[in-house]
Image (cartoon, helix red, strand yellow):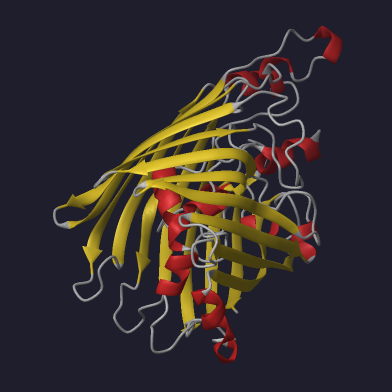
Amino acid sequence: MKKNWMMLGVLAAIQTGSCGRGLAGIEEVGVEGAAGTEPASVPFAGTLTGDWGGLRSAVGRRGVVTDLSFTQYYGGLMSGGVADDGFDWGSRADAMVHVDFGKLGLWEGGGFHVHGETRFGEAAERRFPRSGGLWPVNAGVVLPLGGSERLEATSLYFTQRLAEKTVLMLGKINVIDLLAGDPFFGGWARDRFMNIAFVAPPSGVVPPTIMGAVVSHRWDAISVTGMVFDPEDRTGDYWPSDLFASGVNVSLGVNWAGKVAGRPSGFGVTGTYSTKDGVDLGELLLPPDLRGGGKSGAYNVAVTASHLVYERADAAGKGLGVYVKAAVADGNPNPIEGSVIFGVAGHGVFRSRPDDVFGIGCYLYDWSDALVTGLAPVVGLSGERGVEVFYNFAVTPWFRVSADVQWVDPARAAVAQAWVGGLRASIQF
């Protein structure tokens, strides 16, 4: 029971937040976006291996762009929690390939995207968080699901521009990739926060890797995104067998991006509904033959808001921002009843450190009343809270070192509050 309960934090589905912003982020790391991030005079200056003697630029002009990285972590429990205070190593490697069919000479507006990733090391083999909390303090050594030392292609999807401002995505999609353009959430536990509450805020209705379709249409300031996908996690699947066999998930998001007081701001609402049948959480401890008919109709509705309180006059979009996300859920069969996540993040705030990133984030998750009641005979539960602070120091444009400290107040009342510390080093190839 203990192991299954601790792993609930990993297996609970992930809510990606602002879907419209997410699609914009995918375009930013796509073929044209990735090529556009490098100075024309020094192609791929932000990578260790550079332009590969001109080959990288030549391939990019033909429509194929790569993003390769390797990240190492060293961290552990400093006090509290449920385990000893030892520190351990963990690593992950990510390879993203974006193909532009138009530049490749096939057809305009089409593309194909791959994200291969693997995790390994002592930290990646740990079965539950030392903090005693449900949410892993380092998503980088927990995802992809399926075990350490396994290479998984968590994104294998096609994109097609249906109109000037309408994009279709179809296939297997890593939901963290959808947050590529978000300045606060996402980041693959490589670029910003490490706790999964910030990397991919769990909602109970969106698995880490989905199979389905996403359509987004953008007006000048407003974007609308619709998603239809299988409710099961598809991390280890490479063929759409049994698609929608256990139900269907649908999501609709509306987002506004503009300026307030002359600085970039955003507001969004996203709702997700699942028809998948689940266990009545109030009957978790009952033998299967004494349980009722189960529950269905899980949902999550999230509201997000952001505002850049300080923007550098000489670097548009860089500065210090405030971010908040609040969500409500059904609470049964969804183990989550509500959550609030907020914080501040800075990118290039200091002119002398234009590539440095830092953030302070707080989260509070309220668990289902049915879950609390159902597990009361064996474990006492309360809301789970946490705070994370990080600073990502750009030693060079391609080598970054981060310091990270987290405070976790676990959901289990019998577990002491935990302090977790860690270091992170990432290289862009």
Instruction: Describe residue 377's horizontal placement relative to residue 182 as left or right.
Output: right
Q: Nearer the viewer, residue 234 or 370?
A: 234
x and y percentages locating residue 190 in the rendered image: 56, 65
Q: Residue at x 68, y 16 (%)?
A: 280
Q: Residue at x 19, y 52 (%)?
A: 259
User: Quarter holding the C terminus?
Assistant: bottom right
Q: Residue at x 66, y 29 (%)?
A: 380
x and y percentages locating residue 312 in the rendered image: 23, 71
- Looking at the image, which residue sits at the far left? 261
User: Quarter holding the N terminus?
Assistant: top right
x and y percentages locating residue 64 in the rendered image: 56, 70
Instruction: Describe residue 134's horizontal placement relative to residue 193 as left or right.
Output: right
42 lies above or below 393: below
Q: Nearer the viewer, residue 360 or 352?
A: 352
Q: Residue at x 27, y 44 (%)?
A: 219
209 lies above or below 177: above
Res 12 → quadrant: top right
Instruction: Describe residue 408's horizontal placement relative to residue 127 as left or right.
Output: left
Instruction: Describe residue 127's horizontal placement relative to residue 308 as left or right.
Output: right
